[in-house]
Image (cartoon, rainbow, N blue to C red):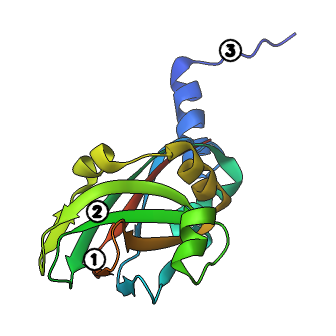
Amino acid sequence: MKRFVCSPLLLSVLAVTLVLCGCIVSGQFVVVIDWGGFASTDTTLNSKHVDLTTNSTWVDHKDDIQDIIDVKFKVTIHNAMSTEATGEVYVSSASYTTLSEVKSSATRILHGISIAASATKTIGFDESVAYRENLDVLLSLVKEGSFYIYGIAENTPFSIEIMEGSQLLVTFSAG
C-alpha cells in the first residue's frame, strides 16, 4: 500500500493557488461612495440615492458579507444663510420630499455640525465619529445596499448645500 505524504510546502502552494483562483477570499474591504452635490432649504428638500449595489467591490463580495463594520463621512457643507446653521444628516430606505417627512420618518445619523453664516465647513472621516448617532440603523441600511441620504439644518429657515466631494467610507468584512 502506498502512503501519500503532504509536505508543508505543498500545502502552502495549494493554499496560495486557491486564494489566487478566488476560492478563498476573506477579510475587510473598504468602499468609498460619493454623495454630495445637492442643496436643501426648509421648503425645498433634496436627497441623494446611495446605491452600493453598483460598486464593483460591493458586487464582488455582496454574497459573502459577514458584517458592516463601520461607516464614516467626509462632508463639506455650505451655509447660504446670514445666520449660523446646525447641520444634520438623515438616512432612510424610502424617498421623502418634505422636511417634516424626513424629521418624522428618517433616522438622524449626524448632528451638531455648526456652520457659521455664509460659510463652508468640512468634516473629515475621523472627525465625523464625534457627530455620529444611530450607527446601528445606518449599518443596517448599508447592509441592504441602497438608501437615501438628506442634508438639512436643525434650525429653520435654512439653506445649505452638501458639496461635491463629500463621501461615505464603508468598511465591511466578507469571507
Left or right: where 83 falls relative to 44:
left
Residue under label 1:
165
The answer for how far apart the CA atoms under marks 3 and 1 are is: 57 Å
Quarter of the picture containing the C terminus is top right
Q: Do the residues labelled 1 and 2 touch (CB within 8 Å)?
A: yes
Identify the mark nearer the N-term, 1 or 2.
2
Q: Are marks 2 and 3 in contact (CB under 8 Å)?
A: no
Which quadrant holds residue 53? bottom right
Q: How far apart are marks 2 and 3 (CA)?
A: 54 Å
Q: Where is residue 9 in the image (x, y as percent from the top left)?
A: 51, 24
* Element type where label 3 sits in the image: loop
Front position among marks 2 and 3: 2
Residue assigned mark 2? 74
What amino acid type is highlighted by mark number 3? Val
Element type where label 1 sits in the image: loop
For the point 61% across and 73% down, which residue is it? 101
The Cα atoms of the two marked residues, 1 and 2, are separated by: 8 Å
